[in-house]
Amino acid sequence: MKTKGIYALTAGLLVMTGMATSCSQDGPDNPDGKPAPRKEINLTEKTRAAADGLVDFYSRFTIDMAECASRAGISDNKNVVVSPLSAAMVFSMAANASDENIIKEYCKYLGVDDIESLNELSKVLLEKLPVADNTSSFSLENSIWVNSGYNLKLTNEFSDIVTSKYLASTKHVDFSNTEATLKALNDWCASNTDNKITGHFKDVNPSTYAILLNSMYFKGKWSDDIFDSSRTKAAVFHGLDGDSSPLTMESDFTEGLYASDNAYECFTLSFGNKAFRLEIILPAENVTAENEGDRLTAERIANLRKMYAKASVKAFLPKFSAENSHNLNNMLSAMNLGGLTLPGLTMFTKPVTGGIQYNQSVSFTLNETGAEAATITSGSMDPIAPGPMEIQKITVKVDRPFYFFIREFSTDACIMSGRICNL
């Protein structure tokens, strides 16, 4: 593929879909390490509508973050990884802490009809995603850190919602003791991400009212051990910054989904009991950024998914690791959504004026064993904010910039996403 065609990837993304609270590994419920049959997560009519609405948000969030990072030159190698699900959790808690007008704006941005259905869906995801695959480790945790120096108290309504729907713990800490608070915050982040994210917070603002926190950790093994390390070898990857020779894994032919619209092809590979899937979206060699019709959009992703058919897929996939830290306010501002960071905060028993600074730290690794992902998303509230078909055999070489998603099969929850341009 010619390098000129890579620039169409500015809409790129890496998305892992569907991770949540507590962990599931070999233990009393999985003594032999064998996958238990996957089970569909049952949703009501309202929570299904909310889940369907969030699917579009997951795609848009990934594309918007990738484009924002490219414009700002944030990512030196142009690789961008994010966690849409983690961001959605913090945005949802913030919505419940805001006045009615801002709640409507959050719901519109997240693609849901009302905050109540979003709250109910969040509880389902927090309870069900961690146990969706008995061979994977998965945790999704929320917490609220309140600055005790202000003598602020959470309203009963907000406290009930974050406790019952977001399963969040509440901590009261004196932020004026910046060193101790900084350590406590980063210790919480490290302990909930298997020490993959240890320095999300660089400092503590003693005037911060409160901090909303979400952590996500996922470690999943490939279904049926489809990658053999003996078949891993160096291969050419045509990146934005020129060709490189990363280690590339070769899979067995395995059951998956495949679709193509001539400009893009996409396919899936499964983890464990197939509750979680890795989805790769790869541009055709003739795709160029100069052609507006070649851009990857949330609508295009949705249309590709409608075209999915069962296939026997062999993949040549590069091993890689990526880490990013994102100021989400920059992206929201670029999308003319800066108003979401300046809500009328209603979470306390007395009115306060301020804004929210959103940040996200992400770590992701893909290798012959499987995938490991960790995320911390924070929202700091400050006085001043900133149809049946014949099975095909498909072979795909991922040797050029691509997008990926990891999604849970029944809710489409997307735990991580991103764009990989250079290796």
Image (tube, grey):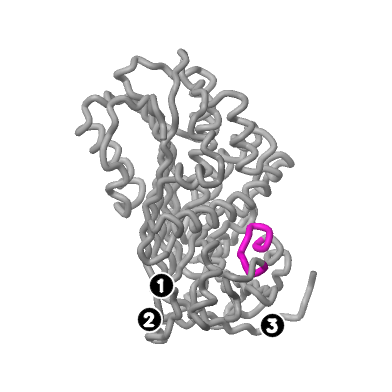
CA gap, disc 3 and disc 1: 30 Å
Given this view, does label 3 or label 1 mark the residue nearer the observer?
Answer: 1
The reply to whether dot 2 and dot 1 touch (C-beta < 8 Å) is yes
CA gap, disc 2 and disc 3: 31 Å
Q: Quadrant of residue 387?
A: bottom right
Kindly identify which numbered label has been placed on residue 244: 2
- Report the residue at 40% width, 82% height from top: 243
Q: Say which amino acid is labelled 3.
A: Gln
Q: Quadrant of residue 45?
A: top right
- Report the residue at 54% width, 26% height from top: 98
Residue 296 at x, y percent in the picture = 61, 64
Residue 287 at x, y percent in the picture = 60, 76
The magenta-colored residue range is: 293-301
Q: Between 179 and 232, which is closer to the camera in this rendering?
A: 179
Q: Quadrant of the C terminus?
A: bottom left
Look at the picture and state if 27 lies above or below 337: below
Question: What residue is disc 1 on?
Answer: 422
What is the secondary structure assignment of the residue under circle 2? strand
Is residue 297 visible to us here?
yes
CA gap, disc 2 and disc 1: 8 Å
Query: Could you tell whether 257 is left or right of 279 in the image?
Result: right
Q: Say which amino acid is labelled 2.
A: Ser
Kindly identify which numbered label has been placed on residue 392: 3
